Each structure stands twice: as C-alpha cells, then as structure tokens.
Amino acid sequence: MGVTNPAASKYQRHSMVLVPLATAGVKIERMVPVFGSYDAPFGHGEVSFTNVRLPVDHIVAGPGRGFEIAQGRLGPGRIHHCMRTLGAAELALELLCRRSLKRVAFGKPLADLGANADVIANARIKLEQARLHILKAAWMLDEVGTKAARSEISQIKIAVPNIALEIIDQAIQIHGGAGVSDDLPLAALFTAIRTLRIADGPDEVHRALIAKLELRKYRPRCDHTA
Ligand SMILES: Cc1cc2nc3c(=O)[nH]c(=O)nc-3n(C[C@H](O)[C@H](O)[C@H](O)COP(=O)(O)OP(=O)(O)OC[C@H]3O[C@@H](n4cnc5c(N)ncnc54)[C@H](O)[C@@H]3O)c2cc1C
C-alpha cells in the first residue's frame, strides 16, 4: 500500500497493489524474528522494492481505494484478533487453575496459598468483561457498520490483549520455571499477544481515537454561518 496521489483528499491518496514475489526488483532482505524466535512459519519478511513495475490490473479494487480496503478489513480483523486472544486467555486460566490445585507447597495446594484465589477470581471477572465487550463490538459492527463502531472496536483492541497478557503472566508465575519454558504454551502465548499491543495500531493510537470520539459528543459544534 502506498501514496499514489498526494493531491487527492485524505482518504483517497493511497492504493493497494498485488506484487508477485517473482517480479524483478522484489527482494526478501531477511526474515525478522519476534522475541528471538521465528513467528510461524518463517518470521516476517523485510522486503525491498527497487524500481518494481507492475501491470495496471495489479491495483486492488482501483486507484485511490487503499484506505477504504484497509479500513474495511480492520474492523472484522480486530474482532477476530480479540476472539483468538480471549481463547488464549481462557487456556491460560485453565492451566493456572489445574496447576494451582496440583502443586502442593508448604503443605497446601497453591490455590490455598497467598492471594492465588483472588488471582483466579479476578481473572474470571476480567475474562467475562472482555467476552461481553467483544460481543458488543461485534454486534455494533453488524448493526451500525465499521464507522459507527470505531470506538468499540478500538476499545476491545486495547482491553482484550492487556487482560490476556495479565492472565497469561499470572499463569506463567504459578507454573514457576516450567511457565517460562517451551514445555507449556504460555511463553509463546505471551510473546504472540504482546505483539498485538503494537500490531494493527499501538494502544496509544486506539486510545487517541476513543478520546477523540468521546470528546466529540461535548465539543461545541462549529457554526459555519457565523
Ligand atoms: C509481529 C508483527 C506483525 C505485524 N503484521 C502486520 C501486518 O500483517 N500488516 C501490516 O500492515 N502491519 C503489520 N505490522 C506492523 C504494525 O501495524 C506496526 O508495527 C504498528 O502499527 C506500529 O507502527 P510502527 O512499528 O511504525 O511504530 P510507530 O508508529 O513508530 O510507533 C511506536 C510507538 O510510538 C508510540 N506512538 C505511536 N503513535 C502514537 C500516538 N498517536 N500517540 C501516542 N503514542 C504513539 C506508541 O508507543 C507506539 O508503540 C506488524 C507488526 C508486528 C510487530
């Protein structure tokens, strides 16, 4: 995706093109690891494009429609990210609970030690909040469309990965050394979901949009007749 017409209006400046890998001038410089290991299957490619030429019909949808295509995909895509993240957090809580009942330390199961019962209860509360939050955003998307659901979509894009990371972190903690190993899926889940606080827009950018839409309700309307 790139700017193809800087003079066009803000949302019509970009176009998307499909570039076959075999095109002259396309080079995969390297595969970039994430947190030290290759994101399945091979990592993310750093690709350079030098004087690449393409037939006009490789433009997706038409010139100037890049922003529109990206925006159309991002709403459902973010809901999908959040649904998978919720599943990961559910798995983490299940592993946390099983371990806290099985492992006995100082004569008691971990579930009965310290504040571990509170950790479990708080995790369940946050998961249910996250589930309903996602459901509301998905419902809004269906009922009023991507544009009117922008705040809700940004809300879950921040809330769900942060909740999941907290629960996965607690699950890692309760597994002790095993939690940071590759014997369990927890370390891999933590790194995968940590990237979601950046990919598809960093938390800060989504917060800025939520605040802008919230403030819009109270800003005095600009009176163009004055
Ligand atoms: C594993 C992974 C997979 C990805 N997959 C894809 C993909 O499939 N397709 C795709 O298009 N992109 C993908 N990305 C790119 C991703 O969308 C960008 O990395 C992301 O949007 C952040 O852009 P940036 O890296 O240029 O960081 P920057 O824009 O430089 O932001 C860096 C930091 O600056 C701060 N910041 C930025 N803007 C603001 C703001 N407005 N207010 C306050 N603070 C701010 C935030 O802390 C932010 O994390 C992927 C990234 C990762 C890590």
Image (cartoon, helix red, strand yellow):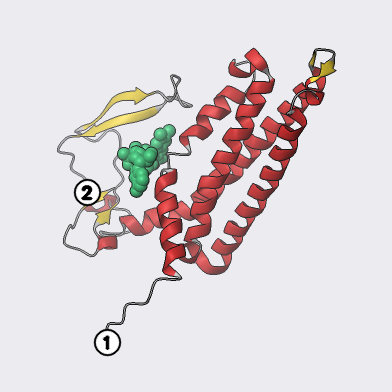
In this view, the residue in front, 65 or 126, is 126
Residue at image position (47%, 60%) is 150
**Rendered residue at 66%/26% (across/down):** 171
Identify the element where label 1 is drawn.
loop
Where residue 148 sits in the image (x, y, percent)? 48, 66
Where residue 77 sits: x, y (%)? Answer: 50, 49
Q: Given the current orientation, which residue lies at the most extreme right position? A: 107
Which callout, 2 or 1, points at the residue further toward the start of the chain?
2
Res. 138 image quadrant: bottom right
- Distance from mark 2 CB to nearest ligand 1 atom below 8 Å: no
Quadrant observed for ligand 1 in the rendered image: top left
Q: Is residue 193 left or right of residue 43?
A: right
Label disc, if present, on residue 225 of the rendered structure: 1
Give coordinates of residue 63: x percent, y percent.
25, 59
> Where is 96 relative to 104, above or below?
below
Q: Quadrant of residue 24?
A: top left
Q: Amino acid at mark 2?
A: Pro
The image shows a total of numbered marks equal to: 2
In the image, 192 versus 151, the foreground residue is: 151
Residue type for callout 1 = Thr
Q: Which residue matches tag 2? A: 55
Q: Nearer the viewer, residue 50 or 181?
A: 181
Q: In this image, 4 relative to 73: left or right?
A: left
User: Is residue 77 visible to us here?
Assistant: yes
Residue at figure coordinates x 82%, y 25% from the top left: 112
Identified at 26% across, 62% down, the residue is 10
Residues 40 and 175: in front is: 175
- Answer above or below: position of 12 versus 82: below
